């Protein structure tokens, strides 16, 4: 379902067809055609001929009669206008009726207690999977600026949602969504600034939605910089990797740390949004359990500086930074020269966005240091990675699964 925006559109084909048919009728009458019911038109002025040419769109030639005489080209043009003009009018009327009587149009007029989602990516699918288990009958509207045809069909048929093409920063669309009757708004698109702009407009139009607008921000640095704004107090702002990283620490690392007698060594191979979130959560709830941390990333120096700039991690343990690709043997030679991974049970998290490199490096580390607790990250749940991990003692972590496991229950009620 597409919703018109309050933006002037270019002339469509009907305008050109109408102009052509009017011109055909006018030229036919002006070319000397005599008609059966109004022979006086033949000698009338051009303005009168133009008036009757316009009348063809309403009643065709019924009020002036059929062509009797005149040049063949003029009669041909007039016959074209006789048939074409009323057909064009009828098609426009039928299209207008279809739009007025459209089920989606009426559904939006009476919809209430509904959930509105902006964005149709993986995060939306994860949320809908959980939502349909908890609230199978709640009405859901998914809006995006464009849809992949297969994804749109999946949303409509599998998750029973209404899809709308539009932009939530446009007041016309917001005015049609009955915001004051909505249960919750989720902004899960790819453009962070657009999401904050939409949230601002939504809360301005419907202040009662305060606390019920959930906004996903891709950029952790941008999200942290806006934490002390009024809008942040009115919304729930989150990042998928931050959500996944916090859940990973609580579900997988805390028990391991408690089982070990001494403080633990943690190697973070990959220090993007996921790695930063893991270290932030470790600092928040398990800093006393950590002996030292090693950070490995091809852009490690800059990323560590960014984290330090935001003062989200003030460690009371040694932190060593190794700049380089996790696939490079020299990087691991430097790591193992600095940290002895052969003692106790160090934790090694291969958390880069390169799934193949994560798994291959995890296999190498586990083979060389069988005492280590090794995790390899994938985006989605991978049967292949799970099978290889089970065979070699490597634990697989899926970002999608971690996100779905840690989505707050209040977002689903």
Image (cartoon, helix red, strand yellow):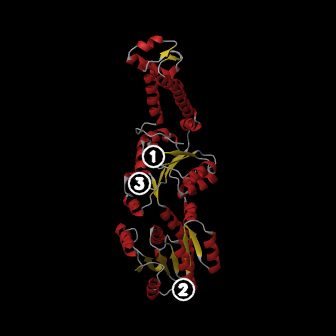
Q: Mark 2 points at which residue?
A: 344
How dense is the environment of label 3, judged by Cα within 10 Å: few (below 14), some, or many (20 and up)?
Answer: some
- Relative to residue 361, is residue 14 depicted above or below? above
Query: Could you tell me which secondary element the residue under label 1 belongs to?
Result: loop
Tell me the mark number nearer the camera, choosing from 1 and 3: 1
How dense is the environment of label 1, judged by Cα within 10 Å: few (below 14), some, or many (20 and up)?
Answer: many
> Residue at the spot x=43%, y=43% of the render?
207
Question: Can see residue 412?
Answer: no
Please tell me the numbered disc located at residue 267: none
How dense is the environment of label 2, judged by Cα within 10 Å: few (below 14), some, or many (20 and up)?
Answer: some
Specify the quadrant that holds the N terminus: top right
> Residue at the spot x=54%, y=69% of the render?
248
Who is closer to the viewer here, 96 or 306?
Answer: 96
Q: Name the residue under label 3.
A: 232
How far apart are the alpha carbons under marks 2 and 1? 53 Å
- Relative to residue 35, is residue 318 depicted above or below? below
Who is closer to the viewer here, 221 or 299?
Answer: 299
Query: Could you tell me which secondary element the residue under label 3 belongs to?
Result: helix
x%, y% of residue 18? 46, 29
x%, y% of residue 85? 51, 26
């Amino acid at each position: 379902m597409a919703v018109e925006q309050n933006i002037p559109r270019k002339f469509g084909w009907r305008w050109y067809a109408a102009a052509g048919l009017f011109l055909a009728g006018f030229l036919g009458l002006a070319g000397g055609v005599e008609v059966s019911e109004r022979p006086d038109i033949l000698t009338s002025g051009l303005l009168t001929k133009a008036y009757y040419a316009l009348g063809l769109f309403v009643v065709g030639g019924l009020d002036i009669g059929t062509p009797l005489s005149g040049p063949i080209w003029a009669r041909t043009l007039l016959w074209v206008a006789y048939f074409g003009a009323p057909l064009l009018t009828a098609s426009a009327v039928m299209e207008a009726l279809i739009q007025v009587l459209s089920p989606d149009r009426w559904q939006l007029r009476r919809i209430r207690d509904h959930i509105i989602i902006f964005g149709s990516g993986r995060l939306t699918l994860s949320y809908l999977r959980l939502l349909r288990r908890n609230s199978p009958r709640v009405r859901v509207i998914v809006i995006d600026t464009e849809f992949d045809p297969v994804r749109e069909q999946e949303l409509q048929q599998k998750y029973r949602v209404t899809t709308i093409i539009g932009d939530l920063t446009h007041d016309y669309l917001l005015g049609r969504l009955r915001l004051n009757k909505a249960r919750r708004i989720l902004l899960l698109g790819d453009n962070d600034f657009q999401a904050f702009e939409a949230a601002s407009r939504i809360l301005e139009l419907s202040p009662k939605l305060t606390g019920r607008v959930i906004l996903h921000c891709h950029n952790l640095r941008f999200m942290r910089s806006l934490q002390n704004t009024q809008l942040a107090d009115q919304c729930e702002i989150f990042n998928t990797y931050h959500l996944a990283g916090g859940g990973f620490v609580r579900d997988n690392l805390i028990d391991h740390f408690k089982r070990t007698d001494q403080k633990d060594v943690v190697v973070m191979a990959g220090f993007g949004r996921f790695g930063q979130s893991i270290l932030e959560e470790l600092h928040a709830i398990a800093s006393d359990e950590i002996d030292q941390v090693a950070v490995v990333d091809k852009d490690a120096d800059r990323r560590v500086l960014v984290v330090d700039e935001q003062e989200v991690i003030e460690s009371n343990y040694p932190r060593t930074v190794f700049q380089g690709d996790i696939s490079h043997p020299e990087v691991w030679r430097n790591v193992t020269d600095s940290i002895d991974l052969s003692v106790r049970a160090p934790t090694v998290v291969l958390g880069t966005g390169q799934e193949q490199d994560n798994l291959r490096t995890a296999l190498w580390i586990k083979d060389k240091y069988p005492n280590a607790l090794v995790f390899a990250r994938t985006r989605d749940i991978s049967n292949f990675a799970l099978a290889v991990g089970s065979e070699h003692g490597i634990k697989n972590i899926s970002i999608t699964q971690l996100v779905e496991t840690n989505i707050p229950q209040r977002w689903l009620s």
